[in-house]
Image (cartoon, rainbow, N blue to C red):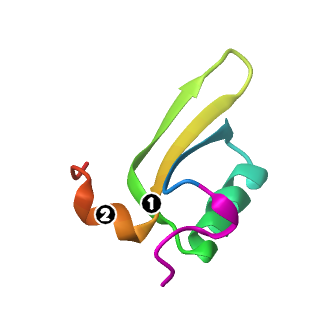
């Protein structure tokens, strides 16, 4: 495991978007890079679509943050 994410990505990220296959792929790609899910996903409705959010963290910061 690398101590930092690849390509200068941050150690904490909040992925957001319409709840569709594209969003699921983005989360899956982040997991494949080595990120871990952090907390439960959130969802809301904007009048047209369900909008979702999922926090992800790089494993090396896991012990330095409060647990969800």
Position of residue 6 relative to residue 55, above or below, is below
Position of residue 2 relative to residue 43, above or below, is below
* Residue 44 belongs to the span the image colors magenta: no
Q: Position of residue 6 (x, y in %)?
A: 64, 70
Q: Residue at x 39, y 55 (%)?
A: 38
Position of residue 62 relative to residue 12, above or below, is below
Residue 29 circle label: none
Q: Is mark 2 on a helix, strand or loop?
A: helix
Taking depth in this image into account, of 55 and 63 the one nearest to the observer is: 63
Residue 62 circle label: 2
Single out the mark in the foreground, 2 or 1.
Answer: 2
Taking depth in this image into account, of 66 and 48 the one nearest to the observer is: 66
Side (left or right) of 6 relative to 4: right
Q: In the picture, residue 64 is in which quadrant?
A: bottom left
Q: Residue at x 57, y 70 (%)?
A: 31
Q: Is the magenta stretch mostly helix, strand or loop?
A: loop
Side (left or right) of 17 relative to 41: right
Q: How far, Cα to Cα, is label 2 from label 1?
A: 11 Å
- Mark 1 or mark 2, which is nearer the start of the sequence? 1
Position of residue 35 relative to residue 11, above or below, is below
Q: Where is residue 68 in the image (x, y as percent from the top left)?
A: 25, 48
Q: How many marks are shown on the rendered structure? A: 2
Residue bounds of the magenta highlight:
1-9
Q: Where is residue 43 in the image (x, y as percent from the top left)?
A: 52, 34
Q: Which residue is drawn at 60% across and 23% down?
A: 45
Q: Position of residue 20 (x, y in %)?
A: 73, 47
Are the two marked residues, 2 and 1, in contact with CB atoms closer than 8 angstroms? no
Query: Circle 1 sits on which residue?
Result: 37
Outermost residue, bottom direction?
A: 1
> Is disc 1 surrounded by few (<14), some (14 to 19) or many (20+) residues within 10 Å?
some
Q: Is mark 1 on a helix, strand or loop?
A: strand
């Amino acid at each position: 495991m690398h101590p930092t994410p690849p390509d200068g990505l941050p150690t904490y990220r909040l992925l957001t978007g319409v709840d569709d296959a594209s969003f699921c792929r983005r989360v899956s790609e982040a997991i494949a890079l080595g990120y871990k899910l952090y907390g439960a996903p959130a969802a809301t409705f904007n009048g047209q679509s369900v909008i979702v959010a999922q926090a992800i963290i790089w494993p090396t910061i896991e012990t330095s943050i409060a647990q969800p």
